[in-house]
Image: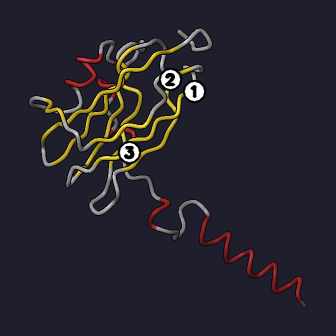
Amino acid sequence: MKRRTLLQGGSVAFALTAPGLVGPAFAQPALSTADWNKAGFEAKTAADAIRHLGSGTVVASRDILIEIQDVIENGARTRIEVTSRIPNTQALSIVTDRNPYPLAATFHFANGVEPYVSTLIKVAESGTIRVIVSADGRLHAATRDVKTTIGGCG
């Protein structure tokens, strides 16, 4: 009898999580592939990548906190944590100036979500890491200089 109950419960769980059936709202993608910033991710310079993030001038901000090692031993996998204290943060982008493709990542935030990111990025060579935050139609930026040692990929 317990086996039958277990199988019935498993069938319900499968039905709720199977593709195309009703499932939790958080499991749905926020952006489609048509929404991604192709031009920004294909840019060869940091200036071009930033230009594709939005219009207007970029204003320096102390309300963007960047946690990354000053000396990076493995540039192929570098942990970075970013927090934005700028109200109404809608997007956060990480740009590595010396990478072949400088735009490393872009994250979009829904209203009310804490703008915090922890991820791994590639840092090809010593240089500047920029975080660009889009909030209320304006771009804000913070920078951090890092050094990649011999163990890095640069």
Task: For marks 3 and 1, give the CA distance.
Answer: 27 Å
The answer to whether marks 2 and 1 mark residues whose Cβ atoms lie closer than 8 Å is yes
| Amino acid tagged 2 | Lys
Task: For marks 2 and 1, give the CA distance.
Answer: 6 Å
Task: List x then y, in percent, for residue 93.
Answer: 33, 35
Task: For marks 2 and 3, give the CA distance.
Answer: 25 Å
Residue 96 horizontal side relative to residue 80, left or right: left
Q: Give the camera-side residue of 149 and 89.
A: 149
Q: State the residue position of label 1.
A: 77
Q: State the residue position of label 2.
A: 122
Task: List x then y, in percent, for residue 121.
Answer: 49, 29
Task: List x then y, in percent, for residue 27.
Answer: 50, 60
**Numbered tag placed on residue 34 in the rendering:** none
Between disc 2 and disc 3, whose residue precedes?
3
Instruction: State the SS at label 1.
Output: loop
Between disc 2 and disc 1, whose residue precedes?
1
Residue 15 horizontal side relative to residue 113, left or right: right
Q: State the residue position of label 3.
A: 32
- Disc 3 packing (10 Å; few <14; some 14–19; many ≥20): few
Residue 118 horizontal side relative to residue 138, left or right: right
Task: List x then y, in percent, for residue 108.
Answer: 33, 47
